[in-house]
Amino acid sequence: MSKALRSKWLWALVVLAALAIFESRRPVPFSNQPGLAKASSRPVSRDLAAVLPFEDAPAAPQSAVSKPLVTMDGKAQARALAKELAGAGLMQGVRFVESPGELKGETLIIRGKVLESKLGNPKDGKRFYSLGVEISAARPGRPPFWQVVLSRMARSTGRPEAVEIDDLVRGLYAQAADELGGALKRESAAASPAKN
């Protein structure tokens, strides 16, 4: 192989390596693809659910160790929960609504509150993410029949930040979907007449 051809091949490999490094450092958009919750072959209930925007976490002072996660505001959390619930197949339908004025006959209203949303970078240099939420489900005009407080914390594994946040959120809402599915089953069993 001639020296000029070898030089061209070497240059091409350097460019490809640089492109691969650049691509791996590019932020990945927050996607929250549903599917971590145990998908049901048929819905647990015939409900049409609406998920309202969560109340945002109270403003916490930033420290040298942690700061709020801007991608984890109340609207983003409600959308993520709606996607996870839809993917789990617990109900006939689930949708995110911006306000109670957009409700159109839904039989289940889901509300929430972001309790904590942090990105931390302690002295050891390993990032961590933490998210805490309070979620409730109620029938229109009734008090909640299901309430839960969930929180999760994860340390960075070196993957892109958006991917790690997405995994944290999906895992948290998969747990919420499983627990809500159990509550819907219990509610349905209590409402059904006893079979003899």
Image: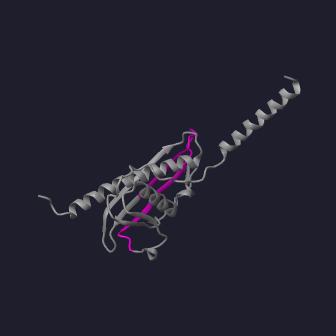
> At which x and y percent is residue 34?
47, 53
Q: Quadrant of the C terminus?
A: bottom left
Extreme residue toward the front, this view? 41
Q: Residue at x 41, y 65 (%)?
A: 111
Please state the extent of the stretch shown in magenta in the rendering: 105-133
Extreme residue toward the left, this view? 196
Q: Quadrant of the N terminus?
A: top right
> At which x and y percent is residue 61?
54, 58
Extreme residue toward the bottom, this view? 101
Q: Is residue 116 above or below residue 14?
A: below
Q: Is residue 101 above or below residue 46?
A: below
Q: Residue at x 49, y 70 (%)?
A: 98
Q: Residue at x 69, y 39 (%)?
A: 21
Q: Closer to the camera, 50 or 70?
A: 50
Most common SS among magenta residues = strand
Q: Is residue 20 above or below residue 102?
A: above
> At which x and y percent is residue 66?
55, 50
Q: Closer to the camera, 104 or 75?
A: 104
94 horizontally vs 67: left or right: left
Locate residue 105: give its quadrant: bottom left
